[in-house]
Amino acid sequence: MGAWAFVIEHPTQGLIVFDTGLGDRARTEPEHFVGWIGTKLAVLDVPEHASLSEQMKSAGLSPGDVRMVVLSHLHFDHTGDLEAFPNAKVMIAAAEKDWAAAGVRRIDFVDTDALVGMARWQTIDYQSEKPLAIFVASHDFIGDGSVIGLDLAGHTPGNQGLLVRTPEAPLLFTGDAAWTEKSWRWTAKPISAWDMSRWWEQIWRINKFAMLEPRVLVVPSHDDIAVASIGIPSFIHHDQPGKAR
């Protein structure tokens, strides 16, 4: 089990991170995240040096230079390396933060250790934001239309995606609204969702957006093949020995 994490090099704003994937603790203390049974079943398979911050360093990027981390949602496989970015402001949907603040259980797949400092995180209230194309609400993080958050709630109360416009094509990072390409292209139903009816609605919107904007490249959160197949110069697929995340 792993989740992709992404670094955006913005021409004026520097480094922006979307999700942080699994950190080293998932390799050294897997029981903390998936319990004894999950550890015995090797649910987490995290090689050495596969954390986002380690891969950034090997690519010549400094985690200390990241000024913004956008979290799609709070499941532990998307927040695992959050502490590696101490200089960044953390951006999250208000509904997601409220959900966690109200109290989460172990079965909610949220690592409460990663929520230290959550009170200082900045929120996006998608209830008061404007729509974008087929999506009901969006948030322009930079102000130039290049990095736009999208309300894709359903998998969790505040799951958000990210639309990044590159010179070759727009990239739509789905968070866990779409785990794999099959999720959004063929509506492959997930095992569970916080609100399954809203999940279906978001999958329809992603699919419809891809029809309206045929240049868009949809980037699911847990699909190694789909991520590796994105073949534009602006998207660099950084790999490591073993199963890099």
Image (spheres, helix red, strand yellow):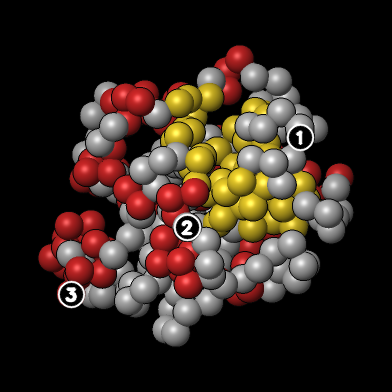
Q: Position of residue 14 (x, y in %)?
A: 61, 46
Amino acid type at circle 2 is Ser
Tag 2's secondary structure?
loop
Please state if 32 lies on the left or on the right of 128 as rendered: left
Q: CA distance from mark 3 to mark 1?
A: 46 Å
Of mark 3 and mark 1, the one earlier in the sequence is 3
Q: CA distance from mark 2 to mark 1?
A: 25 Å
| Circles 3 and 2: CB atoms closer than 8 Å | no
Tag 3's secondary structure?
helix
Q: Residue at x 57, y 18 (%)?
A: 127
Please state if 170 lies on the left or on the right of 175 as rendered: right
Circle 3 Cα neighbour tier, 10 Å, few/some/many (<14 / 14–19 / ≥20): few
Q: Which residue in the protein does label 3 denote?
A: 40
Q: Which residue in the protein does label 1 denote?
A: 145
Quadrant in the rendering for residue 38: bottom left
**Quarter of the image that includes the C terminus:** bottom left
Of mark 3 and mark 2, the one earlier in the sequence is 3
Q: Judge whether 118 appears above or below 221 on screen.
A: above
Q: Nearer the viewer, mark 3 or mark 1?
A: 1
Q: Residue at x 74, y 57 (%)?
A: 217
Let me know if residue 76 appears in the view: yes
Q: Which residue in the protein does label 2 denote?
A: 62
Q: CA distance from mark 3 to mark 2?
A: 35 Å
Q: Position of residue 30 (x, y in %)?
A: 21, 65
The extreme bottom residue here reads: 241
Relative depth, front residue between 152 and 18: 18
| Circles 2 and 1: CB atoms closer than 8 Å | no
